[in-house]
Image: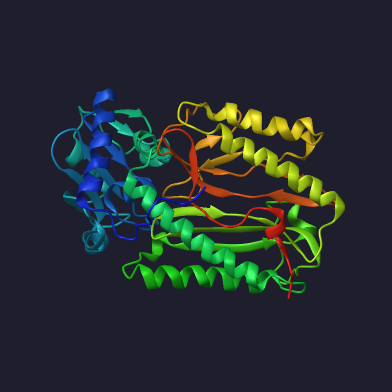
Amino acid sequence: MANIVEPITASPSKAELDLRMDKIRSLMAREKLDFYVVAHTDNVYYLTNFAYIPFERPFFLIVSAEGKSGLIVPLLEVSHAQQRILIDVNYHTYYEYPAPAGKTFADTLSKVIGREKKVGIESSLSIALQKTIPGKVVVTDLVDEARLVKTDYEIGRIAYASSVTEAGLKKVMELARPGAQFSSLYSAGSQEMLVKVVMEMPDVNMLMTKFLAAVWPKALSARPHSIPGLFDALEEGGPNVTIVAGQANGYSAELERTFFIKTIPDKAEKLFDLCMAARQKAFDLIKPGVRAEDVDRQVLQIIKDAGYEKNILHRTGHGFGITGHEPPWIALGSDHVLDKGMMISIEPGIYVEGVGGFRHSDTVVITDDGCLSLTQYPDKLEDLILSGE
């Protein structure tokens, strides 16, 4: 599974962002919308390259079926928006929140949209803000739909984020030995990723950059969403499970490995092999046209057939893009059908109290006839029994 995707560190071109806006307008035409109101911060970033923290002051990107889009923004933030936005927009400001009658964001919305138009909004928009949207309002998540299949540019950016997680995991593994504490591993791995991004992406936007490099030691590895203490330490043996994830200037990836120090307990080797068999089944199944829930069903069946149904705590995988957890969901109950250009994790897990947790995770792109891992780190048992020295 060699990585043949060239990593990209450059900001999106105007042509790339125009392509995304064209996707939205095509979906608007399907829904017969005059305007589409984008307020979720990740979706605004996807369409404009503008990241912000709204606090109590709402921002709205108003996509028009025809003509230039508009950005409704508090006066305070205009210069910030102009610094980052890479598409042509009309800026519409409001004074403050709260503001006197006639100068509120709701007044500006009414001026831009009018009262008789058909307007789409996101399901994530709060009830309070929904009530301020003028026109004939329908709820439809068009940007979420557009984000499912990535462009070549986005895949390149996620390939770069994958290389960043590789650097973080390598640093964690270098330092993993009996007595190494959660806090020191977290600090060193996260710093390694941050330095790499800052050195290689001089215009990095820190609002869209964050990293996690953590190890769940054997005592906690069977509880994947527990929170280790800062001074919890590794011991000889295992399993220990890493969680290395990052958002590198707006695009995300993750890389996880189960590893051992010096020795491997007898019970653990059998479960490691079972987890690897389930993982390989996922790689074998994933290709365009396959139903996501069918992948999850067949992958988890391998674990169930081995007698560990009660030790399954989660789905086979989830999507990546701007965030580290987004559609498509590789899960029972998912309605997604996989397509070329989708990005997913493959991470079936087995969790046995008293023995530990077993999970690898990689960032994977769906190709013409299968899938390709963008995260490259050894995954075989012989490579994951560390000397601990």
Q: Quadrant of residue 261?
A: bottom right
Residue 250's place in the image compared with 234, above or below, is above
Q: Quadrant of residue 273?
A: top right
Total numbered circles: 0
Residue 320's place in the image compared with 51, above or below, is above
Can I make out residue 281 in this image? yes
Q: Is residue 384 left or right of residue 118?
A: right
Rendered-image quadrant of the C terminus: bottom right
Tell which of 169 and 67 is nearer to you. Answer: 169
Identified at 71% across, 72% down, the residue is 181
Q: Is residue 370 left or right of residue 118?
A: right
Q: Is residue 165 left or right of residue 297?
A: left
Residue 246's place in the image compared with 184, above or below, is above
Identified at 81% across, 67% down, the residue is 236
Tell which of 307 and 190 is nearer to you. Answer: 307
Identified at 18% across, 52% down, the residue is 91
Q: Quadrant of residue 299?
A: top right
Q: Position of residue 191 (x, y in %)?
A: 52, 72
Q: Position of residue 90 (x, y in %)?
A: 15, 49
Can I make out residue 327 in this image? no
Q: Is residue 114 left or right of residue 286?
A: left
Residue 19's place in the image compared with 251, above or below, is above
Query: Colour scheme in the image?
Result: rainbow
Q: Position of residue 39 (x, y in %)?
A: 34, 45
Tell which of 10 and 60 is nearer to you. Answer: 10
